[in-house]
């Protein structure tokens, strides 16, 4: 495992999560959300999650945080447009 304060986990949230005995999946989801929200603007999460999985996953394949990271990787992708009105060209009235 890596140490606290690495570039992909500057607050050490995931590092600490992997060290908590008996941590649950819902707790890991909360930690993951905090981690994801603290990523710098414009950071694509998928490559970061892949690096974290390659560091933590092999030694902790059964850990709930590994499962949450795997799910986060599967769900990350290009942003999708949500709601709102699109302006449409209007023809003559």
Image (cartoon, helix red, strand yellow):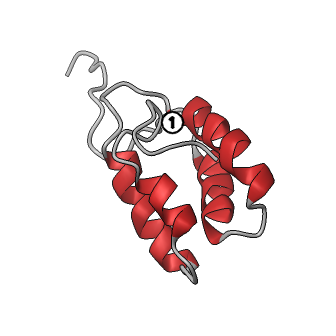
Question: What residue do we see at 51% from left, 73% from top?
Answer: 20
User: Regarding mark 1 in the picture, which secondary structure is present there?
Assistant: helix
Residue 22 position in % (x across, y down):
58, 84
Q: Which residue occupies the extreme front position in the image?
A: 3
Asked if residue 53 is positioned above or below residue 50 in the image, the reply reads: below
**Residue linked to disc 1:** 45
Q: How many marks?
A: 1
Task: Give 34 or 84, whichever is nearer the viewer.
Answer: 34
Residue 36 position in % (x across, y down):
40, 47
Question: What residue do we see at 50% from left, 78% from top?
Answer: 26
Residue 49 position in % (x across, y down):
59, 41
Q: Is residue 39 left or right of residue 52?
A: left
Task: Give 77 or 60, whichever is nearer the viewer.
Answer: 60
Quarter of the picture holding the C terminus = top left
Q: Is residue 81 left or right of residue 76?
A: left
Asked if residue 50 is positioned above or below residue 34 in the image, the reply reads: above
Residue 14 position in % (x across, y down):
49, 54
Question: What residue do we see at 44% from left, 41% from top?
Answer: 9
Q: Is residue 92 left or right of residue 33?
A: left
Callout 1: 10 Å neighbours few (<14), some, many (20+)?
some
Asked if residue 65 is positioned above or below residue 27 in the image, the reply reads: above
Image quadrant where residue 43 sits: top left
Question: What residue do we see at 26% from left, 27% from top?
Answer: 87
């Amino acid at each position: 495992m890596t140490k606290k304060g690495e570039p992909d986990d500057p607050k050490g949230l995931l590092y600490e999560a992997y060290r908590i005995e008996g941590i649950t999946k819902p707790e890991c989801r909360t930690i993951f959300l905090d981690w994801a929200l603290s990523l710098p603007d414009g950071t694509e999460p998928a490559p970061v999650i892949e690096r974290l999985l390659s560091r933590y996953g092999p030694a902790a394949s059964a850990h709930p945080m590994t499962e949450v990271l795997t799910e986060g990787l599967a769900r990350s992708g290009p942003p999708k447009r949500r709601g709102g009105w699109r302006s449409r060209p209007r023809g003559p009235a």
